Image: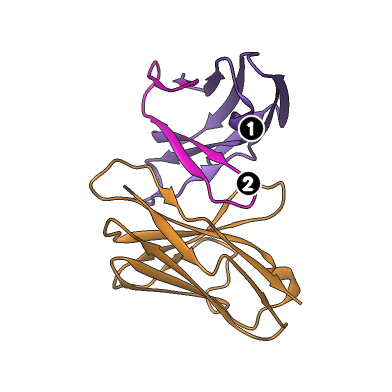
Chain colours: A purple, B orange
Amino acid sequence: EDQVTQSPEALRLQEGESSSLNCSYTVSGLRGLFWYRQDPGKGPEFLFTLYSAGEEKEKERLKATLTKKESFLHITAPKPEDSATYLCAVQGWAQGGSEKLVFGKGTKLTVNP
Amino acid sequence: GAVVSQHPSWVICKSGTSVKIECRSLDFQATTMFWYRQFPKQSLMLMATSNEGSKATYEQGVEKDKFLINHASLTLSTLTVTSAHPEDSSFYICSARDPSGAYEQYFGPGTRLTVT
């Protein structure tokens, strides 16, 4: 069974204080690993897709990396508007063609001014 | 691009009644849409995969007679919660994959259901 574990559950940073969020996963053949941002009471907003170990993607202050067992979301010089819950999800090949996403519980990031 | 909408954004209903939630892809045609459920401080759990023109595929443990899904067109899927009970109160979110893109799913804004 595919599983995703995110750590830490919550993270408080000062504005400008860089850090990383972790996503550990087990999956029977990785089709893709996805990062989303979710604001309170809203649906998840797509950030990145990573497909293979060694791949990296960047968007503004965010950079996602992938290994065979985990993914990191690096936040460089965060701003208060980066405060949100960041969700990691995996999609495996061995699900009979299913496009099911398996999500972690997320990391709630708070950036203080 | 890749915008998904949901309606309503919140709904309150009485126990025993039914409520319908709509999910629309606004700028692309989605042959497949997905319905998730999220409890407070919990991860999103896939309830069912909705395929245009065919029956939905439900995840294990999800009652198909209680959560009716219809995907009548390439831009609209509906979820009907029948005979709702307080334990059905939750945040329901739909998603869709743009066939012209890769495997990422784009999510709607969600519907908060409260059953009294």
User: What secondary structure is marked by label 2?
Assistant: loop
Residue B36 position in % (x across, y down): 54, 57
Tag 1: residue type? Answer: Ser
Quick one: A63 or A3, which is closer to the camera?
Answer: A63
Left or right: B88 with respect to A45? Answer: right
> What residue would you read off at disc 2?
B43
Relative to A13, is B7 above or below? below
Residue A49 position in % (x across, y down): 39, 32
Relative to B62, is A95 above or below? above
> What residue would you read off at disc 1?
A83
Relative to B34, is A79 above or below? above
**Residue visible at 70% across and 70% down?**
B114
Image quadrant in which you'd find residue A92: top left
Relative to A44, is A88 above or below? above
Quick one: A15 or B79, which is closer to the camera?
Answer: A15
Inspect the magenta stretch and tell me whether residue B29 lies in it: no
**Residue visible at 26% across and 50% down?**
B99
Quadrant of the image containing the N terminus of chain A: top right
